[in-house]
């Protein structure tokens, strides 16, 4: 069974409820913008509650934009059931939201302030039924080194897929941990539609063969396990109220 067939009901439901959705403008973020990532783990049953909270925060003006994704069914291993990337106009807006959200989000939700490391492209319209892939990594290096890795290794990979026509946009975030530990990196990849997603592996394979001709890219490809630990990769779609 293809991904397109297995998620047809999810997509149809999503199109019927798109009034709840509002995409974050990742490619052209304001210089003072702040971000937070809220993650519900794979066993969580609180997706509906989180969606309601995000919608309420938007209406109250606490967040300037949000993207909320749900893991699709029939995956062997996922990194989350629901993940929300929240945009704030500035640090002050984030602080105001944090004070309120602390009381509204239960202990089940992982909440982290995040920095946008790099983003390119424009989100596909909801009518196209975009498919997302969200990868989580444990960073083993400083934020500055992770940015260099993103610029020299991740960006060429993503832009190879964008150039092929299958990827609409991508964004790399680095979460801030509450202690001295290195942050978790979150790579969000948006594919234009289900057919584009089905071509992903072939396009990646062809792109990697060409990218290996680039000395910087090859070097990072050889040492990437010393830079980050890939902990999960999750296929997702825009989340909607059940």
Image (cartoon, grey):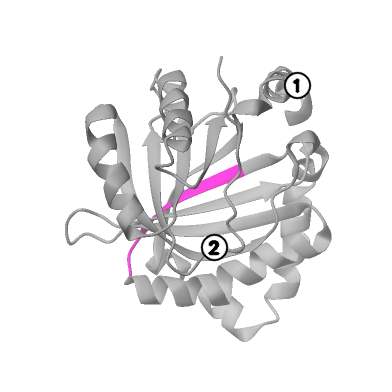
**Vertical side of 7 occupied by 234: above or below:** below
Percent from the top left, x then y, of residue 162? 75, 61
Pair 1/2: label in front: 2
Furthest residue in direction left, as rendered: 179
Name the residue nearer the viewer: 132 or 227. Answer: 132
Packing grade of label 2 (10 A; few <14, some 14-19, many >=20) is some
Q: Is residue 119 visible?
A: yes
Image side of residue 159 versus residue 189, left or right: right
Q: Which residues are magenta?
A: 133-141
Q: Of helix, strand and loop, which mostly describes the magenta segment? A: strand
What is the quadrant of the C terminus in the image? Answer: top right
Question: Which residue, as the protein is rendered here, is positioned at the far front?
Answer: 60
Q: Is residue 156 above or below residue 104?
A: below
Q: Is residue 57 above or below residue 208?
A: above
Judging depth in this view, the residue of 94 and 112 nearest the camera is: 94
* Real-space Cα separation, disc 1 to disc 2, in angstroms: 32 Å
Q: Where on the picture, by quarter, is residue 99?
A: top left
Q: Nearer the viewer, residue 186 or 68?
A: 68
Numbered disc 1: secondary structure: helix
Q: Which of the two discs, 1 and 2, labels the residue nearer the N terminus?
A: 1
Task: Report the quarter where the N terminus lies.
Answer: top right
Tell me the residue that label 2 is attached to: 29
């Amino acid at each position: 069974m293809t991904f397109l067939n297995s998620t047809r009901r999810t997509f149809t439901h999503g199109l019927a409820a798109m009034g709840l959705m509002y995409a974050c403008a990742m490619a052209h973020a304001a210089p003072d913008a702040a971000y937070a990532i809220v993650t519900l783990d794979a066993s969580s049953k609180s997706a509906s509650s989180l969606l309601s909270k995000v919608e309420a925060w938007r209406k109250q003006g606490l967040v300037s934009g949000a993207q909320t994704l749900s893991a699709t069914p029939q995956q062997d291993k996922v990194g989350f059931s629901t993940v929300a990337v929240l945009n704030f106009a500035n640090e002050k807006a984030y602080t105001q939201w944090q004070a309120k959200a602390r009381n509204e989000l239960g202990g089940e939700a992982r909440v982290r302030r995040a920095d946008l490391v790099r983003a390119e492209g424009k989100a596909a319209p909801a009518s196209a039924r975009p498919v997302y892939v969200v990868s989580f990594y444990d960073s083993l290096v400083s934020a500055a080194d992770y940015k260099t890795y993103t610029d020299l290794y991740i960006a060429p990979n993503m832009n190879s897929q964008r150039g092929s026509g299958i990827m609409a946009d991508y964004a790399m975030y680095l979460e801030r941990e509450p202690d001295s530990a290195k942050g978790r990196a979150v790579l969000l990849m948006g594919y234009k539609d289900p057919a584009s997603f089905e071509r992903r592996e072939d396009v990646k394979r062809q792109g990697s063969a060409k990218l290996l001709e680039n000395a910087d890219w090859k070097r990072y490809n050889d040492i990437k396990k010393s830079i980050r630990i890939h902990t999960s990769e999750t296929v997702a779609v825009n989340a909607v109220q059940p």
